[in-house]
Image (cartoon, grey):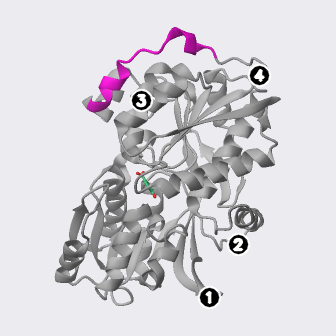
């Protein structure tokens, strides 16, 4: 869908899809001084809005590191202009993120904003960008609605929709692991999106869902009661999504209660990503997961990226760093295409044509969902050279978000 067509969504349709909470933000007018954005020859100002505190802090840091790495490779310039970063901590709450977004746009007068990790935060700031016609490039948060009923021409995503890694995994899990499942996810938008996507394809294949649990977010608290509930249901397989600090808490408890190695864990890949694997240790061994990247994915770009990231940070790369790196590339390619003219409509028009070979494999921005068309891989946590890593066991092929709720 072209950006012109996207603009046919009426404001009433958007509000219906996103709910009244976000409507309050839409009412905030932008200062007229911020409407500019044409090429001035000075630096392009890019606002970075990511969590640097709370359970997703490591995700924010990894995205930042990957993005800076790409910009440095591009000499910190694109479209004939320098790129200047202005960084803010979104924390984990929509009101804080909204306040920081308006500070970036109205006070710092950035040309566009990139970042956002949590689906709740993304939904909370969606109307601000839509109403004020400012471009937001989402580098993580996968809220499905942003590619569907709450789509706006002003938000594009370089990461994934929450549906993407989980829907193909449901069918694979039914065919390869077990026909019954217990589902555990955090009780917020991303958890619900991922559980629904997995259950949709799993049940369509003939699978049975024995039970679901929605755990407190962002702080799960003591995981013991949740693991005990899983044990009581005696499932042959568990599906879950957790990330950052919550992924460490859940998977470690899964090991401590003796489930690891006995009840196969099938999950959204974030749960056992490289950022959390060292802390999870053997509790994660054998877990299989769906994701759009893996440390050991065999392609030239990934070999180059993972080596350079390790050299730069002393750590193994993770999917969030890849998303940051690709976000940097999308921004540079977009600015080159518009020859440094940061008029928002021109930047949006250029985004639909972006495609390249990413460390995650072939990457292109699907104009219908304003989200990547990308391969989903099944990975397994294995011991490789004395450490635990995700190894690709199957490439499920390319997937784009369907753009509606028909498939979960
Ligand atoms: C989200 O809130 O959309 C989200 C957060 C962390 C992840 C993946 C998705 O690892």
Q: How far apart are marks 2 and 1 (CA)?
A: 19 Å
Which label sits in the foreground, 2 or 1?
A: 1
Q: Between disc 1 and disc 3, whose residue precedes?
A: 3
Task: Give the answer, above or below, for where 36 lies relative to 400.
Answer: above
Residue neighbourhood size for the residue with mark 2, other residues' Cα within 10 Å, grouped as few (<14), some (14–19), many (≥20): some
Q: How far apart are marks 1 and 4 (CA)?
A: 49 Å
Residues marked 4 and 3 touching at CB (< 8 Å): no
Task: Give the answer, above or below, for where 280 lies relative to 159.
Answer: below
Q: Nearer the viewer, residue 80 or 299?
A: 80
Which residues fall within the magenta stretch? 21-36
Q: Distance between the residues labelled 2 and 3?
A: 42 Å
What is the quadrant of the C terminus in the image? bottom left
Residue farthest along the top direction in this orientation: 32
Q: In which quarter of the image is residue 407?
A: bottom left
Q: What's the mark number on residue 42?
A: 4
Q: Where is residue 163 in the image (x, y as percent from the top left)?
A: 42, 55
The residue shown at (40%, 75%) is: 266
Q: What's the mark number on residue 298?
A: 2
């Amino acid at each position: 869908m072209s950006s012109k067509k996207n603009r046919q969504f009426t404001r009433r349709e958007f509000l219906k899809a996103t709910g009244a909470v976000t409507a309050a933000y839409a009412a905030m007018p932008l200062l007229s001084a911020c409407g500019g954005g044409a090429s001035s020859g000075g630096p392009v100002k890019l606002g970075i809005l990511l969590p640097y505190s709370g359970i997703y802090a490591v995700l924010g840091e990894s995205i930042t590191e990957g993005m800076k790495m790409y910009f440095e490779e591009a000499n910190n310039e694109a479209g004939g202009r320098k790129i200047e970063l202005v960084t803010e901590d979104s924390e984990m709450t929509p009101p804080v993120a909204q306040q920081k977004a308006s500070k970036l746009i109205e006070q710092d007068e950035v040309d566009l904003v990139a970042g956002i990790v949590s689906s709740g935060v993304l939904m909370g700031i969606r109307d601000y960008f839509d109403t004020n016609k400012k471009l937001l490039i989402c580098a993580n948060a996968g809220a499905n609605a942003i590619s569907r009923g709450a789509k706006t021409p002003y938000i594009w995503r370089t990461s994934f929709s929450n549906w993407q890694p989980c829907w193909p995994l449901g069918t694979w899990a039914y065919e390869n692991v077990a026909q019954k499942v217990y589902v555990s996810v955090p009780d917020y938008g991303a958890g619900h999106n991922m559980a629904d996507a997995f259950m949709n394809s799993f049940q369509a294949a003939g699978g049975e869902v024995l039970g679901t649990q929605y755990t407190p977010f962002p702080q799960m608290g003591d995981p013991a009661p949740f693991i005990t509930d899983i044990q009581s249901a005696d499932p042959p397989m568990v599906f879950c999504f957790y990330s950052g600090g919550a992924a460490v808490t859940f998977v470690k408890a899964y090991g401590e209660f003796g489930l690891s190695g006995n009840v196969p864990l099938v999950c959204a890949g974030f749960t056992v990503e490289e950022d959390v694997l060292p802390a999870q240790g053997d509790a994660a061994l054998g877990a299989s997961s769906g994701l759009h990247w893996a440390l050991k994915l065999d392609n030239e770009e990934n070999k180059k990226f993972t080596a350079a990231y390790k050299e730069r940070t002393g750590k193994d790369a993770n999917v969030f760093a890849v998303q940051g790196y690709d976000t940097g590339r999308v921004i540079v390619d977009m600015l080159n295409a518009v020859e440094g003219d940061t008029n928002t409509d021109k930047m949006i028009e250029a985004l639909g044509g972006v495609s390249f070979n990413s460390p995650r494999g072939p990457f292109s921005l699907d104009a219908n969902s304003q989200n990547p068309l990308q391969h989903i891989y099944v990975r397994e946590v294995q011991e490789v050279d004395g450490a635990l890593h995700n190894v690709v066991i199957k490439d499920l092929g390319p997937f784009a978000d369907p753009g509606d709720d028909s498939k979960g």
